[in-house]
Image (spheres, rainbow, N blue to C red):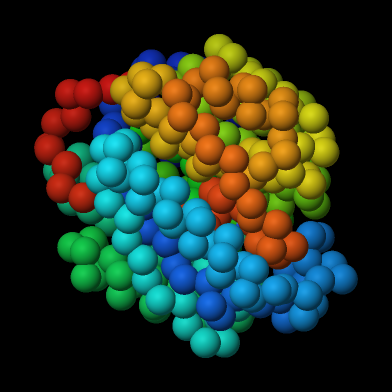
Amino acid sequence: PVFAKAYNPSEVHFMSDDCENRNEPRKVLMCTSEHFSIIDVKNIYMQGQKGNVNVDRANVQWDAIRNSKKKKKNQKIIDDVLVIDGIEGMEDMVFIANQSFPWVMWNGEKIAIMSRMRHENRQNEIPYVEDFYKDHGYKIVELQSKYHFEGMGDMIAHPGKRLLYGGYGFRTDRAAYDEIARIVDAPIITLELISEHHYHLDTCFLPLNHSEVLIAPDAFTPESLNIIRRMFEGVYEIPEEEAIEGFACNAHMIYGQNKNSSAALVQRGNPVSLNILQQSAAQVLEIDTTEFIKSGGSVFCLKMMVYYQESRFCRTSL
Ligand code: ARG
């Protein structure tokens, strides 16, 4: 197996196939949107948007997303859709991809690494998300180091593998990944983010399956782009306007064993990205998340994929 540590791109001398297999999580967690609003500017998208959220419209959009995921449950593409209540005064809690990172250890133990959010008012969301994990049999892991880490917004797994990609530069500190690699006991390839529009890795990097990925190339340094091209056979660069205005890399890709059992949910109005997604997933649904895009998030950040009962030995890979 590949040594568990945080790698700079130039230090990576392995392929994804050298990493152990992992079963993808099959449950979706969402957080209700009734307390969603924009009260400050945490990222470039939020500029000029203070007080500009139409909550009724946001609730309608959120309901449509949840309903589409319920449909995926009925089709047995995912196992469950879980919902926690948003909390009054926590305007960004609806972006449930950010407060934590769930993982399954070698012995089958489920852990949840709790984020250390860059913004103090988002740090207040953490205990509520922690409660969810406690109720679901997870061991809670707090970071010992003082560095910032924003959960699945910045750390994304290679589909079907015990291999992670960690974005840094805006919200998460590079140094956080040293500790996290030891906790998850898996390699993390760190990717420096250089564009304000791509302040989280999930705004510019979307693995489609074990060999293909959708990216916004302007988000990355040349070294990061290079390593992405080495780790994935197919790297699809989407037009910058689809990545920025359309939040196309922030789609929710549901990984099945093959194209037929895979699905995707993406912001509507991204023709190039839609076409690429349709090559890797049998069912691709376009959806409207414009109220949330005002705050710098779309489909991907409005959910968290969580694990349950996994067998000790992963026999299946993608
Ligand atoms: N307004 C939120 C923030 O700035 C948006 C978070 C979006 N989440 C994401 N994973 N991209 O923190």
Name the residue located 44 percent from the left edge and 48 percent from the top edge. 68
The N terminus - image quarter: top left
Name the residue located 79 percent from the left edge and 47 percent from the top edge. 245
Q: Which of the pair 271/240 is nearer the observer?
A: 271
Q: Position of residue 156 (x, y in %)?
A: 49, 41
* Res. 110 visible in picture: yes
- Ligand 1 located in image quadrant: bottom right
Rendered image quadrant of residue 90: bottom right
Name the residue located 57 percent from the left edge and 34 percent from the top edge. 206
Q: Position of residue 47 (x, y in %)?
A: 84, 67
* Res. 180 visible in picture: no
Up the image or down, 241 lies above or below 294; here it is: above
Rendered image quadrant of residue 241: top right
The C terminus - image quarter: top left
Would residue 288 appear left or right of 278 to someone viewing this image? right
Q: Position of residue 276 (x, y in %)?
A: 62, 22
Name the residue located 62 percent from the left edge and 67 percent from the top edge. 58
Q: Position of residue 201 (x, y in %)?
A: 62, 45
